[in-house]
Image (cartoon, rainbow, N blue to C red):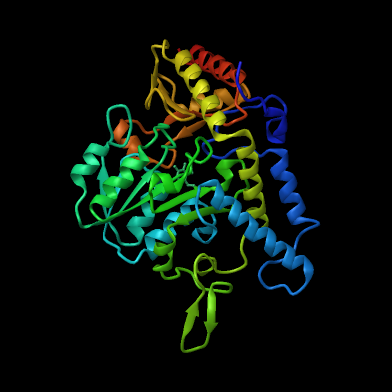
Amino acid sequence: MTAIDRKSEFPGLAGGWHYLDTAATAQKPQGVIDAVTRALGTDYATVHRGVYGRSAQMTLGYEAARRRVAAFVGGAEEEIVFTRGATEAINLVAYSYPEKGRVLLSTLEHHSNIVPWQLAGWQVDVCPLTDDGRIDLDAAQAMLTPEHTMVALAHVSNVLGSTLDATRAADLAHAVGAKLLLDGCQAVPRMPVDVASIGCDFYAFSAHKLYGPTGIGALWGRADLLDAMPPWQGGGSMIDKVTFPFTTYAPPPQRFEAGTPAIVEAIGFAAACDYVDAIGLDAIHAHEAGLVRSLRDALRPMNDVTLLGPEDSAGIVSFTMEGVHPHDLGTILDEENVAIRAGHHCAQPLMEHLGVSATARASFGLYSSQDDIDALVRGIERARRIFS
Ligand code: PMP
């Protein structure tokens, strides 16, 4: 018996589909779909320029969405930059942060928290993991030097589900004068996040993993840091005054939002925050923790299954199965109406560390249930029969 029973509110889950790929993207509740439909339909107009009522109304809605997203992570509205997603948020910091130097990443990072730093010319150092798949902060402490100007780590791993001690990471970064950027993609849908109490400097996340629309995410950045960062893309809406010899820029967050923004998506993002907060992230966290325990308990006795990551992983369980490639397992499970993810999960350095080319990953959302786990276990047993 699970604590949250909301499956019927998600049209994408109709027909008894056992969706266990929420770490890739979450299904959407009807309330978010309705908010997006209204914004794209009866309420639709551009923002920030209109002298007519509908546009002024939409501008209010867009800026209210910014306040809503800011409140969701405990920040101020001028500290929220709407981006296309976490990937763009991290790219923004990698390109625009004025003190480019050494950045400390970890072995388990998603490619979107590796490649931007490489492209933007940072010198990358890599913090190892503990045996149970957490970022080893003792090792980070030993590695950090005054040359490091940034530490950029996943708050929750998208492969192992391990949760970072984010407050300690902030203290360690600050002790050498570096800033801490957290990749919060997998954390914000799974646990309460308060950037002020963590003490981090930047926080990146995507709406689509939080039951909201694709095409939008946010960078939360400390106001004084955003203020010191130059724009990284030019265009409309991000300027103060444009002349051919010289252009001056708007203050943050507009400075970082060139062009017509993702208006409809921002409204949907705010609706998703409302939806999740109404259920409560403590309840969602407890619900997913129960599902993780149940799945790990079901897989642990299987001699041909290797469980990866810590016992208390947050909503995500990765594993490998002897004699069955994760892609084959995924295909057999699909025949059983069960959707898991198989592959490197955009974390190739982590795969190399684990000594595998791919894993199977089941990931939960607030709508997941024991029924989904039972279907997964049945599918694994069928795969074993097929391949033995
Ligand atoms: N970081 C992590 C930990 C992720 O799981 C993902 C999405 N898989 C990303 C970053 C990138 O997010 P997006 O593709 O929405 O920009």
Residue at 50 percent of width and 35 percent of height: 191
| Residue placed most toward the observer, 294 or 373 | 294
Q: Residue furthest bottom?
A: 245
Give residue 362's position: percent from left, percent from top: 50, 27
Q: Position of residue 262 (x, y in %)?
A: 62, 59
Dividing the picture into quadrants, the one containing residue 4 is top right
User: Which quadrant would the N terminus be assigned to in this image?
Assistant: top right
Q: From the viewer's side, name the closer residue of 326 and 221.
A: 221
Numbered marks: total: 0
Report the front residue among 117 and 332.
Answer: 117
* Residue 128: x %, y % from top left: 26, 38
Q: Quadrant of the C terminus?
A: top left
Q: Residue furthest front?
A: 197
Locate residue 133: give its quadrant.
top left
On screen, residue 264 versus residue 225, left or right, reads right
Q: With respect to residue 315, does 139 lie above or below? A: below
Q: Is residue 109 left or right of residue 273?
A: left
Residue pictured at 47% horizontal, 19% vertical: 293
